[in-house]
Structure formats: C-alpha cells, structure tokens
Image (cartoon, rainbow, N blue to C red):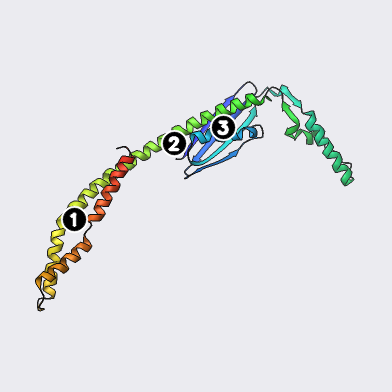
Amino acid sequence: MTGYGRSDEHNDNLILSVEIRSLNSRFLDFSTRLPRQLAPFEDEAYKLIKKRCCRGRVTLSAKVESVPGSINGLTVNHDKLKEYLTVVKEIQNTSGQDDFPSIGDFLRIPEIFSNGATDDEYEIKDIFINALNNALNEMERIRTSEGENIQVDIIKRLQELKVAYEKIQLISEVNRDLVLERYHKKLKDLIQNVNLDESRLYQEVVILCEKRDITEELVRLNSHYDLFNKYMNL
C-alpha cells in the first residue's frame, strides 16, 4: 500500500519534523534522509518501522530546527575547533601558504557549535521516536483507507464476475445441443453423397463439440472465485 505520514514535535529548544512515505513493494525496503543529530537513532527507527510495516518501499526523512529565541544556549565545541585548527596548520605546513580561515569560515562549520539547551541526546531521541510513531500512525490510517477502497472495488468486480459466470454457464448449456445439431447437419450436407456410417458421423460430431466445450474452464473459474471470496472473508 502507498501511504504518507508527517508529524512535528517540539520542546522549548527544538522543532523536529518527521515525514515517512511508503510505496508498493513485495519486500520491506528502507531508506533514510536524516540530519546528523538523528543519525545515531537510525537503527532504532528501522526496528520500529519493521515492526509496523511488513513490506513496502519506505522512506524516512526528518528535519531539526532550533526554536526562535533559543540561540542563547549556543556554545563552541572547543575539542572540535582544536581539531580543525590542527588540520589548518598541517595544510599550511604542507602547502607553504600562510592563509588562515576567517571567522566567517568557522561559523559555517556546524560541527564546532552545540546548543547546550538541546544537546541532550536522550531528549532528542525521545522527541524523534514520538514523532516517528505519530507519523507511522498517520501513514497507517492512509494505507488502511486505501485498502478499504480497494476492497470495495474488488468486491464489486467479484460480483460482476459472478454474474458474468452465471450468464456464460447458461449460454454454454443452451448452446451445447444447438452446436451439436449444427455440426451434425453441416456434416450431413457435406457428405450426403458419400456412404458413411451414421454412428461414425455422430462420433466425429461429439469430438468436435468436446473441443469447443468450456465446462473445465468454468469449473476452474468458479473455483478461483470461491477461493478469492474466502481470502477476502466474504
């Protein structure tokens, strides 16, 4: 089933948006587009999705944003900054260039900053899992609705098939004797001047009629119809 779910969760410092999409597929195929803050929770997200989706091509995406006004908690990750400075010095020594990155260059490196108010991994994880569960709930509602609509259409087509089957069966029974008589008359006209045993003639006519008989196909069709009805719990 195809489906879509979205959920937005937040606390005082961050807003987390989760989207999940599902397309028809025979097996469960899972892919993600997660920001770095949520990457550690990808395995747990997959386990949760696997519990609730037995198959389908499922895509999970998420976005994390700071709540406006919460930027006061922004701090420098000094360890990361030192790592970048060490790399800069190595590049200078190797290249012989004295160019040094500007403050603006460092401001464009998100890894050297952290928001102290939202840096609690467990808090982010809880918000993410809650948002994912809510998005899955919405997706399941959509998939269920689509499934119910498809079921209604299938039931309607099954009813039409049953009506067509009964008409074909009736026509087949009526035509059987007509075809037999038609073949018999036609063969007699063709061989009226030929000396032929009439019992042999009837035998050939019966063989021709058997080749045109659709009883086996009708039995098979009715069997498939009954099995499908049982599968649909009708």
The secondary element bearing badge 2 is classed as: helix
Q: Nearer the viewer, mark 1 or mark 2?
A: 1
The secondary element bearing badge 1 is classed as: helix
Point 76% across, 31% down: residue: 112
Which residue matches tag 1? 172
Q: CA distance from mark 3 to mark 2?
A: 18 Å
Residues packed near mark 3 inside 10 Å, few (<14), some (14 to 19) or many (20 plus): many
Point 83% across, 35% down: residue: 85
Residue 206 spot, x, y in % from top left: 16, 65
In the displayed structure, 149 sits above or below 197; it is above
Q: Counting residues from the N terminus, which is met first, the one under dot 1 or under dot 3?
A: 3
Which residue matches tag 3? 18
Q: CA distance from mark 1 to mark 2?
A: 42 Å
Along the viewing direction, whichever of 180 and 114 lies nearer the viewer = 180
Residues packed near mark 2 inside 10 Å, few (<14), some (14 to 19) or many (20 plus): some
Residues packed near mark 1 inside 10 Å, few (<14), some (14 to 19) or many (20 plus): some
- Residue contact between numbered discs 1 and 3, judged by CB atoms under 8 Å: no
The secondary element bearing badge 3 is classed as: strand
Kind of residue sitting beneath label 1: Ser
Along the viewing direction, whichever of 223 and 40 lies nearer the viewer = 223
Which residue matches tag 2? 143
Point 44% across, 36% down: residue: 143
221 lies left or right of 24: left
108 lies left or right of 164: right
